[in-house]
Amino acid sequence: MKKEDIITLPNPSLRQKSKKIKVIDAATLKLIKEMTDAALDWEDSRPHEISAALAAVQINALERVVIVRSDFEHKESREFTVLINPEIIKHEGKIEADYEGCLSVKNIYGKVPRHTKIRVRALDIDGNPIRLRAEGFLARVIQHEIDHTNGIVFVDHIENNKDAFYELDEQGELQPIDYEQRVVGHGLFDD
């Protein structure tokens, strides 16, 4: 799959809950490969960004599958960790607002409040149950992707905060944007 296969708002699939995976089979493995291919193709087209993660719904597959980049620091590292049927079992730490972008929200970023620590359970790619603790940026990324599996997009958390929306300038720096023109007029909150 290519970056063009990643759906964006206002596509109604992004507002739907994804189904649990009952059996990890060849179709699931194919889906994971397609997700990885699409995420990396998107990243290859963006000089200032990495593809931190992707949920299956973002390639229009309503399955509870998430891939999370294994190394956020090095763009040349192109491996992802697979989380199947992920769910947050505990929110911890404090709530902090920080910047987020989304492959399904074109050219708009937001300063989103999220918990700084979480505990998650999921299945790995072999169907083995896993539990993990995440904090900082990893916790933010996982919360963002699990939201996708529940039909929630990051902009939903900041819809009523006009000062929380940004875009990247040509140097890769985030700049505030005109809420009415770029956010409301962009169809982000259309159902």
Image (tube, grey):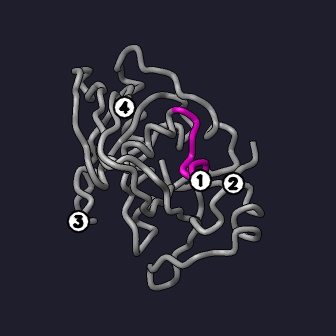
Q: Secondary structure at mark 1?
A: helix
In magenta, the rendered stretch is: 150-157
Q: In this rendered view, identify the residue nearer to me: 154 or 33.
A: 154
Is 78 placed above or below 174 here?
above
Instruction: Indicate the position of residue 158 as horizontal and vertical percent values.
Output: 59, 55
Considering the numbered disc 2 on the image, is that residue within a helix, a strand or a loop? loop
Q: Magenta includes 32?
A: no
Instruction: Please rate how many residues cluster around mark 1, counting C-alpha atoms within 10 Å: few if below 14, some from 14 to 19, many from 20.
Output: many
What whole-number distance in Å separates the C-alpha atoms at marks 2 and 4? 25 Å
Can you give x and y, in whole percent of width and height, for residue 154 in the image?
54, 50
Q: Callout 2, which amino acid?
A: Leu
Residue 68 place in picture, x, y as percent: 32, 46
Question: From mark 2 to mark 3, how far is it between C-alphas?
Answer: 31 Å
Marks 2/1: CA–CA distance = 7 Å
* Residue situated in front as seen by the camera: 186 or 60: 186
Amino acid type assigned to the residue bearing label 1 in the image: Val
For marks 1 and 4 on the same chain, the one whose residue lies earlier in the sequence: 4
Check disc 4 and report the residue beneath it. 88
Spatial CA distance of label 4 from label 3 is: 27 Å
Quadrant assignment for the C terminus: top right
Q: Secondary structure at mark 3?
A: loop
Q: Which residue is mark 1?
A: 155
Q: Is residue 43 left or right of residue 19?
A: left
